[in-house]
Image: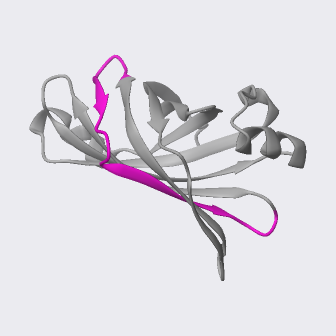
Amino acid sequence: MHELQSRTLFTISMSLDPVIEVGDTPAGHRRVFTVSGGHFEGDRLKGVVLPQAGSDLLLVRADGSAQQDARIVLKTDDGAMIVMTYRGVRHASAEVNAKIARGEHVDGSEYYLRTVPFFETSAPKYAWLNQIVAVSVGERQPNGVSYQVFEIL
C-alpha cells in the first residue's frame, strides 16, 4: 500500500445567508444554509461561488455532530462552470457548538470539520476535475465558511 499524498487544489470562502430552521425530522435536526456568494483560488483555477446557486442541507445528528450535504456552483475567472458537491462532518464540544450557533468566531483547531468534495464540469480545460478525489479541512466563520481543498494524488 502507498502512503496517502495530496496537493493543495484551492482555498474557498463562502458567505451564508441566515439559517433556515427546518426543525426535528426523523433523520435529526435539519438546518438549511443558502450560499450567498464567495470566491476560490488555487494554482490551477480561481473564480467565484455563484450566489443563490447552492446550499448546505445540514443535519445535526443525535450525537451532536453536524453532517454537511452541500451543492454549489463555481464560475472560474475564464467563464467555466463547475458544480461542486460535498459531504462532511463537523463535531465539537457542546460549548464550541453553542459558540458557532451564536455566530461567534471559533478557531478551527477547536473542532473537526472535514469534507469530501466532488466536481462536475463540461469545460475541457477543467475536465481533469471530473476524475479526482478531494478532501478539505474547514473553518466556520461568523457569516460563512472556508475550506482548504486538497487533491488526493
Residue 133 is covered by the magenta coloring: no
- Residue drawn 48% across and 32% down? 149
Query: Vertically, is 4 above or below 44?
Result: below
Q: Nearer the viewer, residue 68 or 42?
A: 68
Question: In this orientation, does residue 133 appear?
Answer: yes
Question: In this orientation, does residue 151 appear?
Answer: no
- In the rendered image, the residue lying farthest to the bottom is 26
Is 62 on the left or on the right of 78, as rendered? right
Q: Nearer the viewer, residue 11 or 24?
A: 24
Location of residue 45 (image quadrant): top left
Location of residue 151 (image quadrant): top left
Image quadrant occupied by the C terminus: top left
Q: Which of 53 and 81 is in front in this view?
A: 53
- Residue drawn 12% across and 30% down? 79
Is 109 on the left or on the right of 129, as rendered? right
- Residue drawn 73% across and 31% down? 104
- In the rendered image, the residue lying farthest to the top is 43
- Residue drawn 37% across and 20% down? 42
Residue 60 is covered by the magenta coloring: yes
Q: Where is residue 56 in the image (x, y as percent from the top left)?
A: 49, 54
Query: Vertically, is 26 above or below 63?
Result: below
Give the colouring mode of the picture: one colour
Is 45 on the left or on the right of 18, as rendered? left
Q: Position of residue 66 (x, y in %)?
A: 68, 56
Q: Nearer the viewer, residue 24 or 132?
A: 24
Q: What residue range appears in magenta? A: 41-63
